[in-house]
Amino acid sequence: MRVLGIETSCDETAVAIVEAPAGAAPGGLILANVVYSQQTEHRRFGGVVPEIAARAHLERIDGLIEDALTEARLGLDDLDAVAATGGPGLIGGVMVGVMAAKGLAFARNKPFLAINHLEGHALSVRLTEEVDFPYLLLLVSGGHCQLLTVRGPGDFTRLGTTIDDAVGECFDKTAKLLGLGFPGGPAVERLAKDGDAQRFTLPRPMWRKPGCDFSFSGLKTAAARLAEGLTADADKRDLAAAVQAAIARQLAERTDRAMVAYAHEHEGRDLRFVVAGGVAANGAVRELLMQTAAQRGFSFAAPALAYCTDNAAMIALAGAERLAAGLTDGLDAAARPRWPLDAAAALANPTHSFGRKGAKA
Ligand code: KG4
Ligand code: ZN
């Protein structure tokens, strides 16, 4: 089954073609994966500008679809379906991807799939690792921080989410404070490498609080206070290391609680833990989560680094998995700025986090 996937929900215009085995087996062979990152368009604004993003997607999308087909040595008729991120995300960009996919699907009479971007991240591990359902997922990105039970495509239970900022925002804000580039996560990680994480004391949000929710705004504010007047490189390195360690610690502490609940619910079954999303590319975060998983008897898996941050291979794979499950969409499916994975949990416990990338769920 070959599916072409399109991702345009933020500042990456991406197209990929994935060949997935029929049935419920994990995995997908990536036949093509092209990404155009709009970082240069947005850098001077210090963040993603929605209008600029939408226009840049529109300018690039046709060429990238052609590039992906060339890379895979396929024609449009060799595809079994066309998938696009249908939300959540910056609506102008999402519309560009959805319309491009619908156009191809209509012209060639192929099924169309509108993919929830978060479902793309949630299944992305299966692009490069053999991980069966169900698993406990920590989804950490620029717009989200959630713990979810993943039972299969379209089948999620949210165990916790951030009550304020997304974890990626905390990295990006810290980078801004320290005068580093955008996006901030990788820059903070590079700077933190030689820093002393013990030098600055940061708050421990949510520590010992019941449940599995997260909070990052207090950390962000504390980092901002400490960053005031810091000019020496050594000081900046130490603050970057302290913030990164505090983020990793909170992620591990809340994940540990979720593991206890998940293990209780899945007694006698294999316990699998997966971390995905842009922040899963962070070495310190991965390392601490790996330790936490080992202590709780969970296996650990994360997507290959290239598939942690936004990409279209995860959208194509989610498309293939949904196609196999018969979950296709009509050409009247709308682009959605907000689209929670677990609608019941989001309704019962709405959070106020819109994220720096706009309202994401
Ligand atoms: O998943 P993603 O590419 O986009 C969203 O769906 O939001 O995540 C982007 C976020 C940004 O906040 C970026 O700074 C962060 O992931 N990020 C990192 C690293 N690489 C990307 N954060 C910490 N360490 C990294 N190495
Ligand atoms: Zn993402």
Image (cartoon, helix red, strand yellow):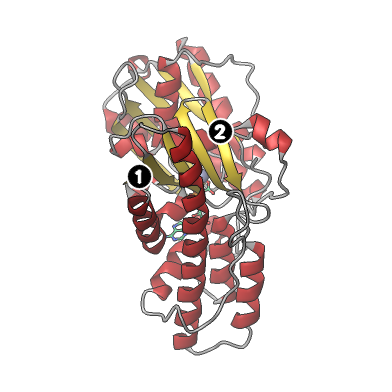
What kind of residue is marked 2?
Thr
**Side (left or right) of 61 relative to 213:** left
The residue labelled by disc 1 is 298
Give the structural element (helix, strand or loop) at label 2. strand
CA distance separating discs 1 and 2: 18 Å
Quadrant (top left, top right, bottom left, bottom right) of the C terminus: top right
Query: Looking at the image, which is closer to me, 146 or 85?
Result: 146
Instruction: Give the quarter of the image for residue 286.
Output: bottom left
Q: Position of residue 170 (x, y in %)?
A: 58, 63
Q: Amino acid at mark 1?
A: Phe
Look at the numbered disc 2 and say if its residue's Cβ is closer than 8 Å to ligand 2: no
**Point 56% across, 70% down: residue:** 174
In the displayed structure image, the side of residue 334 where residue 281 appears, left or right: left
**CB contact under 8 Å: marks 1 and 2:** no
Name the residue that disc number 2 marks: 157
Answer above or below: position of 140 versus 87: below
Q: Is residue 37 above or below residue 13?
A: below
> Does 354 sit above or below residue 272?
below
| Comes first in the chain, label 1 or label 2 | 2
Which x, y percent locates residue 116? 55, 32
